[in-house]
Image (cartoon, helix red, strand yellow):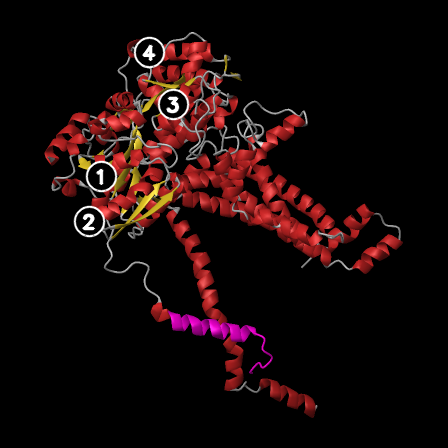
Amino acid sequence: MADHSGTVTRRTAMKAGLATALAAAPLARPAIAASKKVVRVLVVADPFYYALREVTGQFEAETGITVELENLAYDALQARLVSSSIARKPDADVVTVDQMWTGQYLDSNWIMPLDAMMKGDKDLDLADFIPEVLYSLNTWRGHFATLPIASYGQGVMYRKDAFAAQKLTMPDPASFTWDAYLDLIKKLDGATVGGKKLFGTVVAGSQPQPIVHMYTQLAASMGVHWFKEFPEGKWDFTPTINTPENVAALTMYEQLYKLSPPEAINFNWFEAGMRFAHGDIGMFYWWTPYFYLTQRDGYMTGKPSPVGDQIGFATLPHDPKHPQVISAGGWSLGIPSYAPNQDNAWQFIKWATSAKGQKAMALVDKFGHQFSDFGRASLYDDADLQKLYPYLPLQLALLKQSNGKIVRPPAPVYTTLEGIYGLNLNRVLAGNSSPSVALSATSDLFDNVLKGNYLLPYQLPSYDDTLDATKKLIASMA
Amino acid sequence: MAAVAYADGARTTPPSREKRRRQRLPLILIAPSIILLTALVAFPLVFSLRNSFYFWNLQMSPKPLGFIGLGNYRAAIEQSDFVEALRHTLTIAVVGTAIEVALGLAIAHLLAVRLVGMNFCRALLIMPTTIAPIVTGFLFRYMYDAQGGLIPWLIRTAHLPLPAQGLLGNEHTALWAVLAADIWQWTPFCAIVLFAGLLSVPDEIVEAARIDGAGGWTILRRITIPMIRKPMAFVAALRLMQIFNLFDLVLVLTRGGPGSASRTLSYNLYQQGLVDFNIGLSSASTWLIVIIVNVLIALFAVFAFKDIV
């Protein structure tokens, strides 16, 4: 029925809306024209993402390929990658892959080996990458699965003013043992510097990943291996977690926690790092991105830390009884096997991991300079970058001692084992368990999980995964 | 008799085609929705039931590796922290539901008072419910911060004891700190539902009781609560189920720690399914939770609805 009152009824409004939509439909265009070259990139929201998003315009200008960049939190990224891979409908052309997922993704054919693309590419300059980084992060069973966009080692950060106030000096690397580290922390604990009473150190206590990331560095330095034989030789996943070396390491970690703020039991990566940046911690060791993150008072705030100019950097302590092993971590880029734009994806990976792309990321000054996680050796000698990131020579030395496959072995079911390990380490800090009881329980649970997943005894083919094998692989690509 | 015979005859006459069509039309119209809903609800349940009998770990293989009978159920129950997680889950579900419904009822009574600005208060009250639980988690993580958080500051100001590790880092307070965040978020929802229930209580009955000399407590016990039992039972059952499945706040606030002091069944399920990607084990855990929740709700329904229906 016609409405002559001049008011708009619900029916006339709906009719008008429908008519407008129908009329506008032919005008609507797909968001991306079919002919446009696009690469969809899905990354984790780690510091490198903030630098990368500022420089993708350079890639677009050079190649004519439009970048659609999306970031997700760690857990959300993993869940999305797995679900899209199972469905064989990847929603990105380039994805960030944690080194712990590399084997699983490659074995399941969720990502494609990069060997063929790398071999035929003269612009790649593979020899510039640090071999230890490629070995730790990017290879699986003799294939390249990914290339590193952000490469992390672990090192020590300390307060120079606190050392001066307590008349302490940082030992030279040869005499910097874990016992010396603990002694220094004990001397710093309780000191008042800059009007603040210091805690000797800070640990990451939150389970499972943060505590495992920090603790396993100490444990590996003190000679602890997770398994009887992996990644080298004939793989044998018999747990070697419950050993005197690990009990000693966990006892030391417990001591470090007692010299930390008590709430550190619930600290994740960033909370531990920022506690140091806020000025009441004497010294701690952590992933190398904290070399620059602790210069700021928060995540991508751009505001300087109150102690930023007092932060010194040092190599990791070692145990004289064991060869030093430094943790390697970070993020790498890979290509889903069913990605529609694989050529564009390779162009992007090559650019983002190139010396040029990485330097451009390092020069981004939006929140202060917040990226120095290079996988390429040449950038550590770059004078411009050394000016911005004076710790680069130290960081390179740390990466050259790294072996990510020993500290956190990327074995099948790693995340399950990490969950068990993290829970039991946290129990020790909470005072619910002694180091020996916790490690005995961890070992038993590892055994159950490994047997339950048919990994013990290991019946599939092994791969003698050594640094030398990776060096040969690099040479074969030249 | 003739009339009766006529009437009987009319009743036994087959309905016309038009009438039959008219009778079936609603069923035909509603059928797609019912089929879709059944598929959406039934398919995941049946799929996860099937998976629960298979060894299927995505860390090992993208496909199921074999039928293992009740092996996943055994593994789920034999996990070292299953009993502890079940205990925590039951504790927070029962205590949290009781507190939220009791507080919700008290707030609903306040909302029923006719004062200036009450409409604004009602609108304000619904806001916590609209926030995503994960955001609530981050909000409370900052508010619990031992150094600069609002809640530790309030506790210290009130000269109450505060654990050195902070509320989230102490094994005796972590679970309750998680529950407090849930109570903050969902009590307003209980209040709004119960307020709607209170509006259905006739003023005359309350007035009559007052004239007969009944006090506020007696009116609440003898008149108000019996008359809003249906919405109360509904909101309590809903919250019981929701708190039983609480995991997002645990994830953001404590990750089940310290130790396993704040682990819940749903957090374990998250760990098994979305971190470990053990599809078989997480499917078995899902079904264990489904069974436990349904037993709880059945028990609750027997007591709460026994003389309502």
Q: Amino acid at mark 1?
A: Ala
Mark 3 in CB contact with mark 4 (< 8 angstroms): no
**Percent of width and height locating residue B65:** 29, 44
Q: Secondary structure at mark 4?
A: loop
Confirm whether circles 1 and 2 share one chain: yes
Magenta-highlighted residues: A1-24
Q: Amino acid at mark 3?
A: Tyr
- Ranked by sequence position, the earlier of labels 2 and 4 is 4
Residue named by callout 3: A215
- Ranked by sequence position, the earlier of labels 3 and 4 is 4
Quadrant in the rendering for residue A27: bottom left
Real-space Cα distance between discs 1 and 4? 36 Å
Chain letter for the residue marked with disc 2 in the picture: A
Residue named by callout 1: A145
Q: Main secondary structure of the magenta part?
A: helix
Q: Amino acid at mark 2?
A: Asp
Confirm whether circles 2 and 4 share one chain: yes
Residue named by callout 2: A343
Quick one: A330 or B178, which is closer to the camera? Answer: A330
Residue A176, numbered label: 4
- Ranked by sequence position, the earlier of labels 3 and 1 is 1
**Percent of width and height locating residue A149:** 27, 36
Picture quarter with the C terminus of chain A:
top left
Confirm whether circles 3 and 1 share one chain: yes
Is residue A356 found left or right of A450 in the rendered image?
left
Q: Is residue A221 magenta?
A: no
For marks 1 and 2, give the one nearer the viewer: 2
Real-space Cα distance between discs 3 and 4? 18 Å
